[in-house]
Amino acid sequence: MKKVAYLIAILLVISCSPVKNANTSVVSPNSENTVQFSLSEDGQLFYNVSTIETKFIKSSALGFELKNQSLKNGFEIISSEETTENSQWKTVWGQRETVTNNFNELTLHLKQKESNVLIDVVARSYNDGVAFRYVFPKQENLKDFVIADELTEFNFNGDYKAWWNFADYDNYEKVYYNSPISKIGDSINFARRPGKEERANMANTPTTIEVADNLIISIHEADLTDYAGMNLLNTLEGTKLKAHLTPWLNGDLVRASTPFQSPWRTIQIGKTAGDLVESDLIMNLNPPCAYETTDWIETYKYIGIWWELHIGKSAWAEKTQFGRPINRPHGANTKNAKYHIDFAAKHGIPDVLIEGWDKGWDDMEGSWTGYNIFDWKTSTDDFDIEEVCRYGKEKGVRMMMYHETISDIDHYEPAMDELYKMCADLGIKTVKVGYTGDVNYDYDKKTYRQHHHGQYMVRHYKKMVEAAAKHKLLIVNHEPIKFTGEQRTYPNLMAREGARGQEYNAWSEGNSPEHGVVLPFTRILGGPIDYTPGIFDVFLPDKPWRKESFRVRSTICKQLAYYLTMFSPIQMAADLPENYEENAAFQFIKDVPTNWSESKVLNSKIGDYYTVVRKERGTENWYLGSISDENSREFEIDLSFLSEGQKYKATIYADANNADWESNPEAFEIETKEVTSKDKLKIKLAAGGGQAIEFKLID
């Protein structure tokens, strides 16, 4: 009996062994990160991932189920190829000017014995993580096909601590939780929009996982352009997560024809949370810039008729909103627009966002839902778009266009070229495009026709950015598909929301002090965020139609620090103009740049604290942002990032000694001092607080 067991064990080892002469692993250039592949006895491909001596993802399945065919078992490795790249490329804008793209790559060529279907698995190992994707070559044995299930697993070697939020196919604007991997969600029954009592056992990506004190990783995807968005399903089998794709409404996941390739499945790897922020892996896995010229792309700050709408000072609609009469003025009127343009011109801010300027808001059904109610060309009766744009041009200020599509893709997509030409003709540079509500809302069935995160919408978001580029327009996208590094390919895609942003503080329980210290290590790992920072009046006016009181859970200095920690090339000064007048802290918002040549994380712990410094592109000036959760903190910062032998004037915007997010959030102090790269600086953060510093080179 022992001999039989021994022989079985030997056979199992042999069956999972690599094919002779075919390499099945790829190691990073620094020899730390490894992806290893193997075939099971029945011909299914598996992989594992390790860093140095820690195997944190153990044997995990790969493969597909197609609508009429299984691509799970019966494969053999017919050959493998290895390549290496060590190159650099320049960003149009970003956290750094020059990006190093250094990796080792392994391609496994597989064939299913029975069907002769060919699939390649391409894996790359970088110093900051690993990634793999599926490639379907053009072939006679597989032409048009439908993916019914992607079998990719992430089978963790321990019940590590995960930072995640619930996935529901349509909305990333969720609270983040931290829990063991095995506790992600608590029900195998999937709910499209889980509430407090009905939770889905799926997480959005990026999902970030603390493996050990000196090892943190993040699961995401890259180059998502013609595929369904990936969610992470808790299989309830220990610590195993599985790719779960957002479907078309008939159950199809991905519709494809060979040649075809999936997005990259990415695993960023760092010793600290800050290493993940400094990683360029996600962008490196996207194609180079698609545009011949990029001199029309710029970064900047803007104000807008926006926050006043959220806090109830004015309304998007003229007469009725969501079927109810309005008891407050329409915000987007010509007079109010000119007031904002005057303020922007006075303070050197180039753009003013104006929401609610067009007809259709009075016809919206329910909460941000409707179909064929906007034409996106016709102004409301009290708004003259041509006069506003003319006046703005006279003052050196542009209108930022707002198209609320309410996810009416049937009507918005065919109109995009005409609408974007209209914007360009008016001298508009940026279009903010929103996708609230149900995709292609069905009035008869009172339901949606597609999901925001499915292949249908992934294709649309790409078309939208490409259509804007034809007219040299920039895009800021709300209710988006997640960023997966495509800002490298389409650098006119400036920012996406895709998280609980500042607006949630205006009409909900709000964002916790911890929230801002989680986003940089989760959502923002995919790409820049339009968080809309800069709220100074944190105690918000009561709303007559609500009993609750609302407020922003941070100090003013934390709002300033967000301009560094909430990375974006287009940043909003989100508060009302009157709250900035005569407030000395506004000077930092005016001064802080939006494009960087270098960025360094000085300290970080997800959910607790984060300090980052960024060097302004084209100068020697540096800017620092430091934020804390609900706890006060003190740090000593080494200023060795400054240029050696140079003197800098440090202008420090700090929480006052008695500041506190809850009881005294608006107290701050401004101090200036001369510093050099040899100095150390003590930083004190209030509970829920922050600090912002400008280091300006002294000539």
Image (spheres, rainbow, N blue to C red):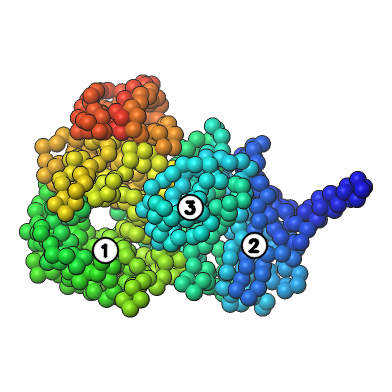
Instruction: Give the mark toward the camera: 3 or 1.
Output: 1
Please tell me how crowded label 1 is: few (under 14), some (14-19), or many (20+) other residues with Cα within 10 Å.
Answer: few
Q: Which structural element holds mark 3?
A: strand
Position of residue 462 in the picture relative to residue 243 (left or right) = left
How far is mark 2 from mark 1, CA to CA? 40 Å
Question: Label 1 sits on what residue type?
Answer: Ser
Image x and y of residue 140, in percent:
67, 78
Residue at image location 66% in from the left, 56% down from the top: 61
Position of residue 472 in the picture relative to residue 213 (left or right) = left
Instruction: Give the mark toward the camera: 3 or 2.
Output: 3
Q: Quadrant of residue 383?
A: bottom left
User: Where the C terminus falls, by quadrant?
Assistant: top left
Image x and y of residue 29, in percent:
62, 43
The residue that label 3 is drawn on is: 203
- 286 or 433, nearer to the observer: 433
Q: Quadrant of residue 456?
A: bottom left
How far is mark 3 from mark 1, CA to CA? 25 Å
Count of labels in the image? 3
Position of residue 461 in the picture relative to residue 551 (left or right) = right
Position of residue 210 in the picture relative to residue 400 (left or right) = right
Q: Earlier in the sequence, mark 3 or mark 1?
A: 3
Question: Label 2 sits on what residue type?
Answer: Gly
Q: Which structural element holds mark 2?
A: loop
How far is mark 3 from mark 2, CA to CA? 21 Å
* Residue reaching furthest to the front: 197
* Residue reaching furthest to the left: 335
Image x and y of residue 427, in percent:
20, 64
The residue that label 2 is drawn on is: 63
Residue at image location 19% in from the left, 48% down from the top: 547
- 285 or 162, nearer to the observer: 162
The residue that label 1 is drawn on is: 367
Q: Earlier in the sequence, mark 2 or mark 1?
A: 2
